[in-house]
């Protein structure tokens, strides 16, 4: 990310002249608006910002940002973005992907970008369905999901995107949802400020092929009792007046309790900067199904060496010892042969 002072921008400066072509009512509109409104606050310039996507409804995103961008091929956005981030560490590189694009054909690229800690801000839109190709089940669809490709119901256990990211040792992991612009902007702001791979899962409604997939958790009528807002250094409480809380048992398992039953001192305090990902992993798996209380916010935010900086140091050290690289000599070094 560049430290250069840039002129003040507005949302208009970040909005392209392209017509937004998502289905009316799609959650993608809210995410796009949150990003466009956030960008002027980050102190960066559109010409130093790049959005890279794969394939899917979410992957139209670069068209709608007045920045550099690339609509890549299916699942390969993290690989393309890795090359750019390493070659141009002065740029702000964002990856836009979906649950199908990022966790199916792109799963390998995603986990390696995270384990390497490439300096990327990765937004994964999770609607638990393939929307662009008209409603097939995705890697995050629940067991029993009836779709065009699973007419008798899916038998595949779904991925938990946060668990995947944490298992890959991602240094920043968070979750938000498309119905709360303020929360999205806060999470995106923190993700952008983090040096290294930032992974944000966004619960996003597909009102055509999977409408209401998250209503039991994120709708306004139930949100207060169903959404657990994680705040670093604060007791994990939720519900009206904070009457519910999360505790860790002697067996290491997390449980939801009534605060009045156990006392405030028993409530678990969130530590997003804990180096061991165990707590973040347990919080990511606290909800048992689509109808139980679910955690949101920043699960993990730790410092790890940035891949691009490590590569840059290695190149500088090599050049200082052996002089500047010579591509022609490399191509004609050991292991070549002549074809006659």
Image (cartoon, grey):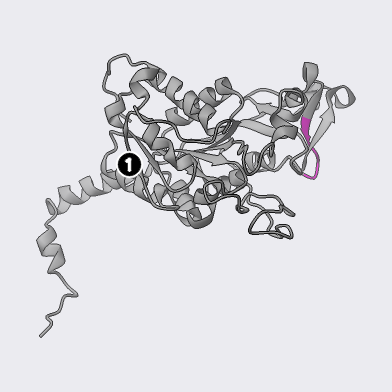
Q: Position of residue 272 (x, y in %)?
A: 59, 32
In the rendered image, which quarter contains the C terminus?
A: bottom left
Q: How many marks?
A: 1
305 displayed left or right of 166 = left
Q: Magenta stretch containing residue 187, yes or no?
A: no
Identify which residue is drawn at 19% across, 75% down.
Answer: 335
**Furthest-right residue in this view:** 261
Rendered residue at 71%/23% (across/down): 220
To which quarter of the image does residue 207 belong? Answer: top right
- Depicted 202 relative to depicted 233: above or below: below
Where does the image place residue 138, in percent across and percent down from the top left?
60, 52
Please provide percent x and percent y for residue 229: 67, 26
Q: On the rendered structure, is 144 left or right of 30?
A: right
* Residue 125 picture quarter: top right
Question: Tag 1, which secondary structure?
Answer: helix
Is 108 on the left-hand or right-hand side of 295?
A: left
Viewer-proximal residue among 181 and 6: 181
Q: Percent position (x, y) of residue 330? A: 15, 63
The reply, left or right, for residue 264 in relation to residue 213 is right
- Residue 291, quarter of the rendered image: top right
Question: In the image shown, does 158 or 322 lie closer to the viewer?
Answer: 158
Q: Nearer the viewer, residue 205 or 20?
A: 20
Provide the residue designation for mark 1: 85
Magenta extent: 246-251
Residue found 17% across the figure and 49% down from its top: 319
Please tell me how crowded label 1 is: few (under 14), some (14-19), or many (20+) other residues with Cα within 10 Å.
many
**Extreme residue in the bottom direction:** 340
Q: Residue at x 75, y 43 (%)?
A: 289
Taking the image as drawn, is residue 189 in sight? no
- Asked if residue 45 is positioned above or below residue 52 in the image, the reply reads above
């Amino acid at each position: 990310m560049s430290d250069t002072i840039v002129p003040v921008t507005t949302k208009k400066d970040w909005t392209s002249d392209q017509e937004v072509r998502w289905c009316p009512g799609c959650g993608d509109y809210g995410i796009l608006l949150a990003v466009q409104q956030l960008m002027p606050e980050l102190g960066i310039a559109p010409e130093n910002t790049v959005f890279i996507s794969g394939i899917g409804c979410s992957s139209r995103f670069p068209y709608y940002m007045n920045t550099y961008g690339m609509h890549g091929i299916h699942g390969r956005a993290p690989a393309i973005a890795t090359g750019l981030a390493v070659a141009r560490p002065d740029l702000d590189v964002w990856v836009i992907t979906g649950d199908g694009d990022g966790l199916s054909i792109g799963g390998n690229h995603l986990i390696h970008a995270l384990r390497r800690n490439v300096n990327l801000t990765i937004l994964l839109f999770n609607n638990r369905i393939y929307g662009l190709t008209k409603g097939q089940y995705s890697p995050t669809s629940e067991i029993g999901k009836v779709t065009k490709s699973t007419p008798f119901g899916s038998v595949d256990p779904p991925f938990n995107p946060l668990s995947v990211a944490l298992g890959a040792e991602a240094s920043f992991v968070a979750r938000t949802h498309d119905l709360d612009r303020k929360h999205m902007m806060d999470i995106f702001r923190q993700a952008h400020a983090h040096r290294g791979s930032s992974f944000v899962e966004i619960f996003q409604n597909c009102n055509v092929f999977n409408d209401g997939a998250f209503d039991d958790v994120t709708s306004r009528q139930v949100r207060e009792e169903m959404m657990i807002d994680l705040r670093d250094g604060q007791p994990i409480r939720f519900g009206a007046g904070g009457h519910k809380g999360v505790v860790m048992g002697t067996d290491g398992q997390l449980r939801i309790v009534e605060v009045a039953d156990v006392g405030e001192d028993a409530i678990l305090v969130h530590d997003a900067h804990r180096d061991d990902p165990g707590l973040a992993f347990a919080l990511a798996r606290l909800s048992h199904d689509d109808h139980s209380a679910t955690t949101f916010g920043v699960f993990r935010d730790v410092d790890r060496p940035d891949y691009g900086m490590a590569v840059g140091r290695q190149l500088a050290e090599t050049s200082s010892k052996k002089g500047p690289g010579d591509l022609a000599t490399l191509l004609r070094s050991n292991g070549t042969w002549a074809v006659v």
